[in-house]
Amino acid sequence: MRRSHVIGVVCCVVALVTLALPGSALAQGGPGGLQWYEGDVFELGYPANASLEAVSDTELRIVGPELSIRPAEMDFTVSGPAYQIEVTVIENPDELAAMDWAEQRVLAAWQVAMDEGAPNIFPVSDEGEIETSKFTELVVNEYPAVQVERFGGDAAIMTVYVVHGATVVEFEYRAEIVENNPLALVQQDIYALIMDTLFFYDE
């Protein structure tokens, strides 16, 4: 999905975010309400009112605008970024398939946690058996991908591995629940939009 193909999706998300965030400038600045990251390996669109932070040479962080809202009939206020997603580029020298990559990546992280005596938050049993129900095969903008869900306290941590030859782009975000965050469903739409703009340059 190149830039010219995302406008319809963007308009839907813009409407959702504008309703959720009065005064939002998402629909302005950039084609279709998007800014574009253009790296050496891929390009990626993200909402125009978000900020893009370079965490390292291989890791980006997309952060939505700050907000503070008190949902109707609730006795608490939600404050902080409207959404946040981490994007990491990883080499896949053996060109593993998406599921093989995801399983190896999760098992390696689980092993490190076990060696350090950390809590097991991974979809892996204490005996090292993968919980396959937490691994879901996806297609992200025509690229094979796998979504992995792991424990994150009051939210699930979702990691989506998108594989293209010798490169993997990893997206990670918190999947909130509406009872804790009234923007949870809007966040899901924004994360889906961002991932669906991913485009790898021809190798």
Image (tube, helix red, strand yellow):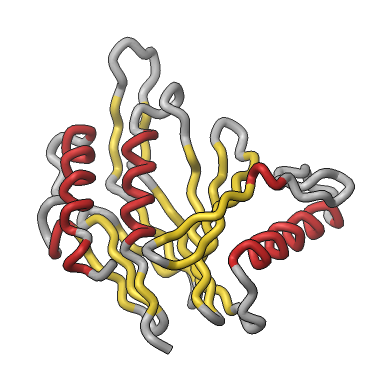
Measuring from the top left, give residue 25's x and y in whole percent.
14, 49
- Foreground residue, 42 or 101? 101
Q: Residue at left 71%, top 43%? A: 121
- Foreground residue, 13 or 35? 13
Q: Is residue 88 visible?
A: no
- Locate the C terminus and report the quarter of the image it occupies: bottom left
Say whether residue 81 is left or right of residue 169: left
Q: Residue at left 53%, top 80%? A: 165
Measuring from the top left, give residue 187's x and y in whole percent.
36, 41
Q: Residue furthest right?
A: 127
- Foreground residue, 192 or 100? 100
Q: Is residue 129 visible?
A: yes
Say whether residue 114 is left or right of residue 81: right
Measuring from the top left, give residue 17's x and y in whole percent.
22, 40
Q: Residue furthest bottom?
A: 203
| 71 to 12, vertically: above or below | above
- Foreground residue, 53 or 203? 203
- Locate the N terminus and report the quarter of the image it occupies: bottom left
Residue 69 occupies which quadrant of the picture?
A: top left
Measuring from the top left, give residue 115's x and y in whole percent.
86, 57
Q: How many numbered discs sit on the rendered protein?
A: 0
Q: Residue at left 83%, top 55%? A: 116
